[in-house]
Amino acid sequence: MKTHAPINLVAKLATFGEHWQPRTVATFNGHDIMVVKVKGEFVWHSHADSDDLFLVLHGRIRIDLRDGAVELGPGELFVVPRGVEHRPVAVEEAHLMLIEPTGTPNTGDPGTAAERRVI
């Protein structure tokens, strides 16, 4: 049995079609490494206890902040500092990698967050 193998993010993304439903593909020092497909506008939210890292793998996104916006394309990343309200937006479908402390609710609120799914 092979114990060491790379994780193919394109293959992982091909296993689901839902938007705004992150999938954990690995863990790293207490953090989830996730992939997610996004399209449309997500909810305005913030994370009181952690920064929020977005890395674009495919497509383009805009991260709206209350005092401006950041545009990202493939290979670009942006870190939203903890406590800063933001809203990711994708006009066309985009694919992202996210890294967050395990258990971080994607909406900033455990009551409305997507269920943690590991693939």
Image (cartoon, rainbow, N blue to C red):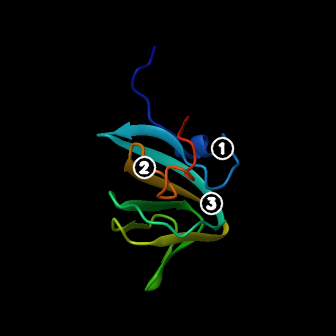
Mark with earlier residue (3, 2): 3
Seen as rendered, the residue at the extreme top is: 1
The answer to whether mark 3 and mark 2 are in CB contact below 8 A is no
Mark 3–mark 1 distance (CA, rounded to whole Å):
13 Å
- In the image shown, does 49 or 60 lie closer to the viewer? 49
Mark 1 lies on a secondary structure that is loop
At which x and y percent is residue 102?
39, 43
Residue on which the image places disc 1: 14
Q: Nearer the viewer, mark 1 or mark 2?
A: 2
Q: Residue at x 50, y 41 (%)?
A: 24
In this rendering, position of residue 37 left or right of residue 6: right
Of residues 48 and 34, the one drawn nearer to the viewer in this rendering: 48
**Residue 102, label in figure:** none
Q: Secondary structure at mark 2?
A: loop
Disc 1 vs disc 2: Cβ atoms closer than 8 Å? no
* C-alpha distance separating marks 3 and 2: 18 Å
Query: According to the image, label 2 marks what residue?
Result: 104
Tell me the residue that label 3 is attached to: 38
Q: Residue 20: name its quadrant.
A: bottom right
For the residues bearing labels 3 and 1, Cβ distance under 8 angstroms: no
Q: Residue at x 44, y 67 (%)?
A: 76
What amino acid does circle 2 point to?
Thr
Callout in the foreground (3, 2): 2
Q: Position of residue 84 (x, y in %)?
A: 38, 72
Foreground mark, 3 or 1, reads 3
